[in-house]
Amino acid sequence: MAFRWRYLDAVGEPVRGPEEIFDDQAQAEQWFGGVWEELRADGIDAVVLLENDGTGDTEVYGPMSLQEG
């Protein structure tokens, strides 16, 4: 299993972001907790956590907004 983040703009379209791959969900969430403000500053509006089991990506949760409020 591998986990990664999908990054979305304000209208929900995918945008470029860091291409980090994590061994488990906890690692992905810990990394995200340290960089979410930078991602927001770079114009990323929301994220989706994806899990890949070798056959394709499955959404774990999201989209999760990075905007305040």
Image (cartoon, grey):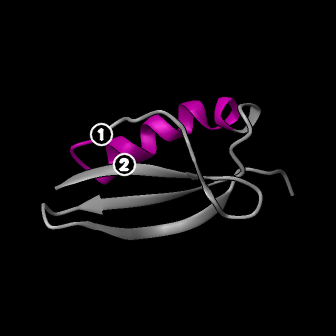
* Residue 44, image x, y percentages: 68, 44
Query: Predominant secondary structure in magenta?
Result: helix
**Considering depth in this image, is 10 or 48 the residue closer to the camera?**
10
Position of residue 60 relative to residue 50, above or below, is below
Q: How many labels, in total?
A: 2
Residue identified by numbered label 2: 4
Find the residue positioned furthest to the left.
Answer: 54
When asked about the image quadrant of residue 62, the answer is: bottom right
How far, Cα to Cα, is label 2 from label 1? 5 Å
Residue 22 is covered by the magenta coloring: yes
Q: What element carries label 1?
A: loop
Left or right: residue 32 compared with residue 50: right
* Residue 64, image x, y percentages: 62, 61
Q: Please state, as top left, top right, bottom left or bottom right, where the C terminus lies in the image.
A: bottom right
Residue identified by numbered label 1: 21
Q: Which residue is drawn at 36% across and 35% down?
A: 20
Q: Is mark 2 on a helix, strand or loop?
A: strand
Left or right: residue 49 compared with residue 14: left
| CB atoms of marks 2 and 1 within 8 Å | yes
Q: Give the range drawn in magenta.
A: 21-39
When asked about the image quadrant of residue 43, the answer is: top right
> Hey, what amino acid is under mark 2?
Arg
Q: Which residue is drawn at 12% across and 60% down?
A: 54
